Image (tube, grey):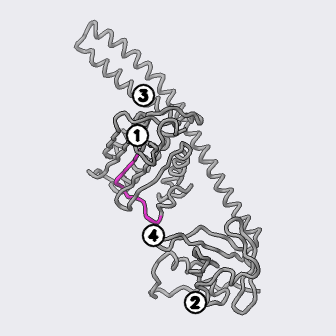
């Protein structure tokens, strides 16, 4: 019966190979091969070489078929049983699993990764199924959590709305009295009504955000939706000493959209920008700016409305840029993010016939662009 030798690691102080992705994979304590687009092996883990008694030069450049007995399992999909041929001729029963692709260097094509497990197919498939089930449970829990927050926000907003309406009504009575008897003091009542009206608008926007609104789409003025969201977070931006700059085209075209979903996307992007700015500038700074821009864009005879949220914060590491919109992937520390904001935002935008793309340089800036088709094309 074949056994799996423990991989040997260099002693402290020994020179290490360059820490590229391939070099790190070679040190992985797993039976692992990395394969290019032509099906050629470009890297093998030290454990794979030791277990099958091959030298690296014996393996690089050859194909998987040279080492698998019988027909190869199809690419991707579920784990499959197969046998590996050792150098001495004996075989080793394993389960072949396709792992996520890797990139050896920025800008290069991803390489396929194949892992061989000593466990039976049923055990590997069960582990994969349990992992998928856990992820589904996390998604369900998160959705339920967000729904409960929405219900709570709606309840709080209703409770605030009633006394605010009373304050406005009493302020109007006071205004009438002052105008008749003390006109020089009438401005006091006007100020009360103005500030109470501002609170009422914030509550109304909070109620609108808390309601899902189903999938109903109406002609939306994006600048108005931006202002509705900003009414909820302007005070927080001020307290964090973040300078806000907003630019709108004059009379931009409307888009067919669900206003509540549009506000959800924008709130997600503002939240991410705030976090990046606060990480880079814990205090105040002239560079601690959040910019929101709305303008029209023509591309291939199609008119889009582009909404851009830009910040000069920490940026996104190049190695993570292609993953930031994957569900549950986050560059934030545990407890600081769920990894769902950008994933949900991309799905919402795609559901509106639009696109969401990110331009970021680590340590300098992040710009998130949302392009929505204007008019009926947004349906």
Relative placement, left or right, of 55 versus 330 is right
Point out the image quarter for the N terminus: bottom right
Q: Nearer the viewer, residue 360 or 283?
A: 360
The image quadrant of residue 279 is: bottom left
Q: Residue at coordinates 43% horizontally, 63% vertically from top-left?
A: 317
State the residue lying farthest toward the left: 184
Q: Secondary structure at mark 3?
A: helix
Q: Of the numbered discs in the image, which one, if any, rests on residue 57?
A: 2
The image quadrant of residue 237 is: top left
Give the x, y percent position of residue 50: 63, 87
Q: In this figure, which residue is indicated by the disc labeled 4?
A: 106
Does residue 158 show up?
A: yes
Residue 148 vertical placement versus 6 (above, below): above
Residue 70 vertical placement versus 220 (above, below): below
Q: Secondary structure at mark 4?
A: loop
Q: In this figure, which residue is indicated by the disc labeled 1?
A: 233
Packing grade of label 1 (10 A; few <14, some 14-19, many >=20) is some
The span shown in magenta is: 307-319
State the residue lying farthest toward the front: 301
Give the x, y percent position of residue 177: 32, 9
Q: Secondary structure at mark 2?
A: helix
> How many marks overall?
4
Q: In this figure, which residue is indicated by the disc labeled 3?
A: 201
């Amino acid at each position: 019966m074949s056994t799996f030798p423990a991989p040997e690691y260099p002693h402290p102080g020994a020179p290490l190979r360059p820490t590229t992705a391939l070099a790190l994979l070679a040190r992985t304590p797993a039976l692992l091969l990395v394969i290019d687009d032509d099906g050629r092996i470009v890297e093998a883990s030290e454990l794979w070489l030791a277990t099958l008694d091959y030298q690296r030069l014996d393996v690089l450049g050859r194909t998987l078929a040279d080492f698998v007995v019988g027909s190869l399992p199809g690419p991707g999909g579920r784990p499959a049983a197969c046998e590996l041929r050792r150098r001495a001729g004996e075989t080793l029963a394993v389960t072949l699993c396709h792992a996520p692709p890797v990139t050896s260097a920025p800008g290069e094509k991803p390489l396929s990764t194949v892992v061989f497990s000593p466990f039976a197919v049923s055990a590997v498939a069960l582990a994969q199924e349990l992992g998928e089930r856990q992820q589904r449970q996390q998604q369900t829990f998160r959705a339920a959590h967000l729904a409960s927050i929405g219900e709570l926000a709606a309840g709080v907003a209703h409770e605030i709305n009633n006394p605010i309406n009373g304050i406005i009504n009493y302020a109007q009575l006071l205004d009438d009295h002052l105008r008749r008897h003390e006109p020089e003091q009438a401005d006091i009542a006007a100020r009360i009504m103005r500030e109470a009206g501002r609170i009422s608008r914030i509550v109304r926007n909070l109620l609108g955000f808390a309601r899902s609104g189903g999938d109903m789409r109406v002609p939306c003025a994006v600048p108005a939706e931006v202002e509705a969201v900003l009414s909820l977070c302007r005070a927080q931006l001020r307290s964090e000493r973040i300078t806000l700059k907003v630019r709108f085209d004059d009379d931009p075209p409307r888009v067919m959209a669900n206003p509540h979903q549009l506000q959800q996307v924008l709130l997600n992007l503002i939240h991410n920008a705030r976090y990046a700015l606060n990480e880079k500038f814990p205090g105040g700074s002239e560079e601690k700016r959040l910019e929101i821009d709305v303008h029209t864009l023509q591309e291939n005879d199609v008119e889009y409305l582009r909404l851009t949220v830009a910040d000069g914060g920490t940026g996104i590491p190049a190695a993570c840029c292609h993953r930031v919109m994957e569900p549950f992937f986050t560059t934030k520390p545990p407890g600081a993010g769920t990894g769902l904001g950008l994933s949900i935002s991309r799905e919402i935008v795609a559901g509106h016939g639009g696109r969401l793309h990110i331009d970021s340089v680590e340590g300098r800036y992040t710009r998130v662009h949302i392009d929505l088709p204007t008019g009926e094309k947004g349906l």
